[in-house]
Amino acid sequence: MKERVAIQGAQGSNHHMVVNELFGVETPLIECMSFNNLVDAILDGSAATGVMAIENTIAGSIIPNYALLDEYDLHITGEYYLNIHHHLMGLNGQSIDDICEVWSHPMALLQCKRFFKKHPHIKLVEEVDTALMAKKIAEGQLKGIAAIAPKMAADLFGLSVIADDIQTITNNATRFVILSKNRPELNLQEVNKASFKFQLNHKRGSLATLLNVLSDCKMNLTKIQSLPVIETPWKYSFFVDVTFQDFADYSKAVSLIEIMAEDFKILGAYKNGRS
């Protein structure tokens, strides 16, 4: 039997789609209504793996999730980029004129803002999940209510798609990371990306110096994100993603950063999802 995978949200969600792509459609799920619950499922062993959204091309970084990775020492074992398609769905036979309310996750509502400007009679209601709202409408046979969710949710729950691809920006993608409680063995032939976390002192040019070291070690910086250190006002942790071609260059960079930075942590070394 396949090991269970924890996702944020319900069946039919974007997280579920990533699981299908990476682990297969028969993979058993643990559906978590928050990212904190997802982390708990990994830590207590309920799930061997977790799938967590970490950033979106429109909304940017999901800041609290970086903090969760750090606080609970989770390991990134891989990543996946999913193109996001938002579909409006409701009970069979309903049209856009029949819909009075749309229930969905706040991010989905935000990303479809232009579509709903054309339909001012519709009230937008923020809920915890996209696919879960589709399921609720189907189970309750709720007329006049629609959900924004992936098309897979309509198929799963027997709903009709009222409008396809209603997102404002068509080039909309989310990066998901694959998480584990334990550090995996690395396949040195495949690993070409890494995620780090570190702090620096307040000396002038300290961040620039470290970034120059990454460049000298042939690391390509693809992401840098700062988070405040709660216990120390005006001090920040930096979360960095780098890609590389030679694992020896990566090892050299790690050895130098360990000397230069404070609270240095390797969040994961894995295969680049876009290579």
Image (cartoon, rainbow, N blue to C red):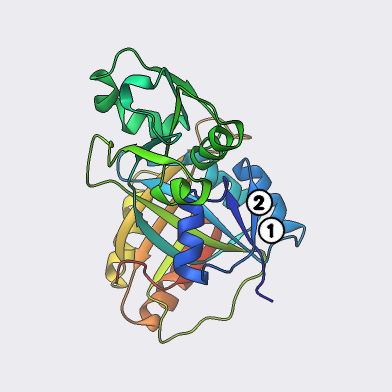
**Residue topped by disc 1:** 42
Q: Residues within 10 Å of mark 1 (few under 14, many from 20)?
A: many
Q: Residue furthest top?
A: 121
Number of callouts: 2
In the rendered view, tell whether residue 25 sits above or below residue 108: below
- The mark found on residue 39 in the picture is 2
Q: Position of residue 201 (x, y in %)?
A: 48, 46
| Three-letter residue code for mark 1 | Ile
Q: Residue at x 52, y 81 (%)?
A: 186
Q: Residue at x 72, y 57 (%)?
A: 43
| Three-letter residue code for mark 2 | Val
Q: Residue at x 51, y 66 (%)?
A: 268
Do residues under tags 2 and 1 come within 8 Å of each other at their CB atoms? yes
Q: Position of residue 44 (x, y in %)?
A: 77, 57
In the rendered view, tell whether residue 87 sits above or below residue 219: above
Q: Position of residue 235 (x, y in %)?
A: 51, 37
Image quadrant of residue 82? Answer: bottom left
Element marked by disc 2: helix
Q: Nearer the viewer, residue 246 or 79?
A: 79
Marks 2/1: CA distance? 5 Å
Q: Position of residue 90 (x, y in %)?
A: 43, 33
Element marked by disc 1: helix
